[in-house]
Image (cartoon, rainbow, N blue to C red):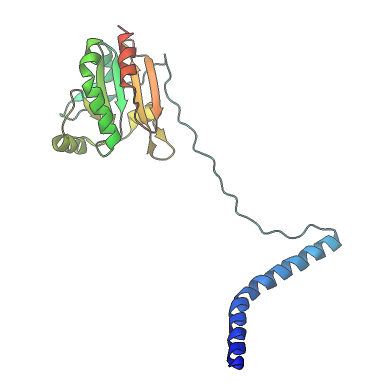
């Protein structure tokens, strides 16, 4: 019985330490190399570590307050084309850049703007919303989920998104919110990783431009 216990104990010892032998040998070699380096007056060898870059992509440039607003002509969901320069002549334009109907926060933001559309129009303001969808996909989304009382524009080439500084890195898109005055200058500018949530503030800005 005692012999069985002794045999079992030896097996447990072997099973515990044998897997650690390569690590112990490596540690002894490293220690010996370090001691040899000190005796020779040279620094001990070090293991090369990969250098990882954590630099963030540079923020794209974007029009600021009082800058000329980049013009655009984009197709709308009903098959026409909309030209920003033509809208400006009629009054200030609230330009919303959103990520499409597959972005629930974007749709909720557009619905909130819809709830304030009468107030916006009372200021003489107008609204357009631009997504990276193709015209066909945009129309399918509208047919499936409903339209809005302002133009929805398609920018599948991301030209307007780029002109307004909303393409980050290789292909990441920002949300954007701009107000363009009757002279074609930017009166309000915001870009973020989420929709702008102060619609009352947008209405107040438009009201102050009357």
Judging depth in this view, the residue of 63 and 202 nearest the camera is 202
Q: How many labels does the image show?
A: 0
Q: In this view, does 40 lie above or below 137?
A: below
Residue that sits furthest to the front in the current view: 1
Residue 25 falls in image quadrant:
bottom right
Residue drawn 54% across the image and 40% down it: 55
Identify the image quadrant of the C terminus. Answer: top left
Q: Is residue 178 above or below residue 60?
A: above
Q: In this view, does 18 lie above or below 85?
A: below
Identify the image quadrant of the N terminus. Answer: bottom right
Residue 150 falls in image quadrant:
top left
Judging depth in this view, the residue of 103 and 88 nearest the camera is 103
Q: Is residue 196 visible?
A: yes
Give x and y (percent) for residue 9.
Answer: 60, 84
Q: Is residue 4 above or below residue 210?
A: below
Give x and y (percent) for residue 101.
Answer: 24, 36
Judging depth in this view, the residue of 54 and 71 nearest the camera is 54
Residue drawn 38% across the image and 17% down it: 188
Give x and y (percent) for residue 174.
Answer: 38, 33
Q: Can residue 74 be seen in this view?
A: no
Residue 206 falls in image quadrant:
top left
Residue drawn 30% across the image and 31% down it: 98
Residue that sits furthest to the top in the current view: 210
Give x and y (percent) for residue 61.
Answer: 45, 27
């Amino acid at each position: 019985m005692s012999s069985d216990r002794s045999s079992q104990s030896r097996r447990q010892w072997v099973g515990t330490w044998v897997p650690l032998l390569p690590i112990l040998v490596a540690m002894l070699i490293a220690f010996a190399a370090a001691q040899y380096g000190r005796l020779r007056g040279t620094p001990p060898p070090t293991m090369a570590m990969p250098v990882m870059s954590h630099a963030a992509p540079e923020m794209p440039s974007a029009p600021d307050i009082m800058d000329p607003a980049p013009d655009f002509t984009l197709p709308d969901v009903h098959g026409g084309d909309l030209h920003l320069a033509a809208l400006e002549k009629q009054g200030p334009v609230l330009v919303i850049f959103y990520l499409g109907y597959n972005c629930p926060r974007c749709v909720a933001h557009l619905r909130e703007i819809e709830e304030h559309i009468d107030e916006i129009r009372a200021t003489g303001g107008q609204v357009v919303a631009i997504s990276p969808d193709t015209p066909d996909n945009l129309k399918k989304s509208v047919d499936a989920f409903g339209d809005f009382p302002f133009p929805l524009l398609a920018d599948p080439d991301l030209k307007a998104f780029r002109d307004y500084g909303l393409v980050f890195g290789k292909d990441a898109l920002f949300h954007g919110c701009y107000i363009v005055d009757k002279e074609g200058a930017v009166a309000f500018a915001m870009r973020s990783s989420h929709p702008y949530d102060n619609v009352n503030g947008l209405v107040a800005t438009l009201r102050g431009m009357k």
